[in-house]
Amino acid sequence: MSNVKILVVDDSSTMRRIIKNTLQKIGFENSVEAENGIDALSKLKAGGFNLILTDWNMPEMDGLTFVKSVRGSDTFKMIPVIMITTEAAKTEVVEALKQGVNDYIVKPFTPEALKAKVTRFISA
Ligand SMILES: [Mg+2]
């Protein structure tokens, strides 16, 4: 599964490190970080991404705008997107799913929980 390429989008560098380390722990070593939607769209252009994990509240371009851009793009629209959210953000989750987010995971999460979500979209 090590050829699976995952884009990790979050404005918190601490959160990005936690997610990246967790992905590594569950066997996904090829991940790329982006700090907001604009950065993420730019990083996507490198190609080959199998999955996007994205935060919602970010400066420059938030998760909602980013997901709309991804779903509106002929090149990127098929990439599965998992939203990483906080327990309090129920209305955001509803809006996110409406905008084409495939699934979500609530922070803080265990490696097992992240693995369960990620493997839903990555076939072995
Ligand atoms: Mg944030």
Image: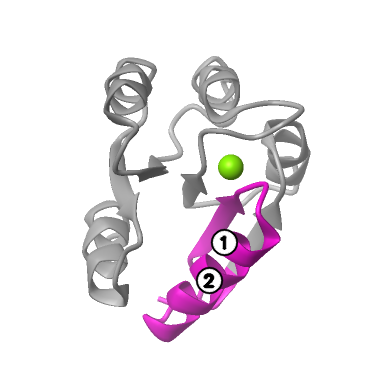
Question: Which residue shows up at 26% across the image and 57% down it?
Answer: 117
Rendered image quadrant of residue 65:
top right
**Which residue is under mark 1?**
15
| Numbered range of the magenta stretch | 1-30
Does ligand 1 reach within 8 Å of label 1's beta carbon?
yes
Q: Is residue 27 above or below residue 105?
A: below
Q: Which mark is residue 18?
A: 2
In the image, residue 20 lies in the stretch drawn in magenta: yes
Q: Is residue 75 above or below residue 27?
A: above
Amino acid under disc 1: Met
In the image, residue 47 lies in the stretch drawn in magenta: no
**1 or 92: which is nearer to us?**
92
Distance from disc 2 to disc 1, alpha carbons, whole Å, reads: 5 Å
Q: Is residue 28 left or right of residue 113?
A: right
**10 or 91: which is nearer to us?**
91
Q: Residues within 10 Å of mark 2 (few under 14, many from 20)?
A: few
